[in-house]
């Protein structure tokens, strides 16, 4: 199993997602963020299950979770979650940036 780490931008993404959901249902927000984090950590067991997205950067893969997309890269000993974004956002355009 690979060690899973979250990029600083992913931490911001998760906070923003949680805040948005909490406007209508604070309990749902906590549960949903926990689900996304659990799915991210499960990627450490099977990193190749996501779809390759080379147009977004070298080694970038994507895995959906409901209406959200988890973007990640596999490194030698770690799997780094790069972004978590709603699927309605402009993934191929200005909305998508990676920390390096």
Image: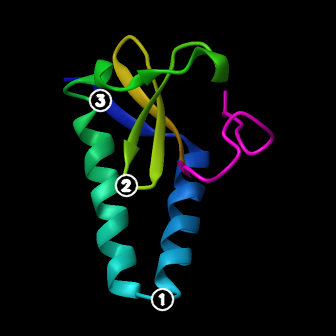
Residue 27 horizontal/vertical position (percent)? 32, 84
- The residue indicated by pointer 3 is 3
Question: Which residue: 61% across, 53% down?
Answer: 88
Which numbered disc, 2 or 1, marks the residue that appears first in the sequence? 1
Q: Is residue 33 placed above or below 53 in the rendered structure? A: below
**What is the magenta range?**
85-100
Residue 16 horizontal/vertical position (percent)? 58, 67
Report the disc number at residue 66. Answer: 2
Please, what secondary structure does the residue beneath circle 2 have?
A: loop
| Dominant SS in magenta | loop
Q: Is residue 42 left or right of residue 23?
A: left
Residue 1 horizontal/vertical position (percent)? 19, 23
Residue 59 horizontal/vertical position (percent)? 52, 14
In reply to whether residue 95 is colored magenta, the answer given is yes
Question: Which residue: 34% across, 54% down?
Answer: 36
Question: Which residue: 59% across, 15% down?
Answer: 54
Please, what secondary structure does the residue beneath circle 3 have?
A: strand
- The residue indicated by pointer 1 is 24
Report the disc number at residue 13. Answer: none
Mark nearer the viewer, 2 or 3: 2
Q: CA distance from mark 2 to mark 1?
A: 18 Å
């Amino acid at each position: 199993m690979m060690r899973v780490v979250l990029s600083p931008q992913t931490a911001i993404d998760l906070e923003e997602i949680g805040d948005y959901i909490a406007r209508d249902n604070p309990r749902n927000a906590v549960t949903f963020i926990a689900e996304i984090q659990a799915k991210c950590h499960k990627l450490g067991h099977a990193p190749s299950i996501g779809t390759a997205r080379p147009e977004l950067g070298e080694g970038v893969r994507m895995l959906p979770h409901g209406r959200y997309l988890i973007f990640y890269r596999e490194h030698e000993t770690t799997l780094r979650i790069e972004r978590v974004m709603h699927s309605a956002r402009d993934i191929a355009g200005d909305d998508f940036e990676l920390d390096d």
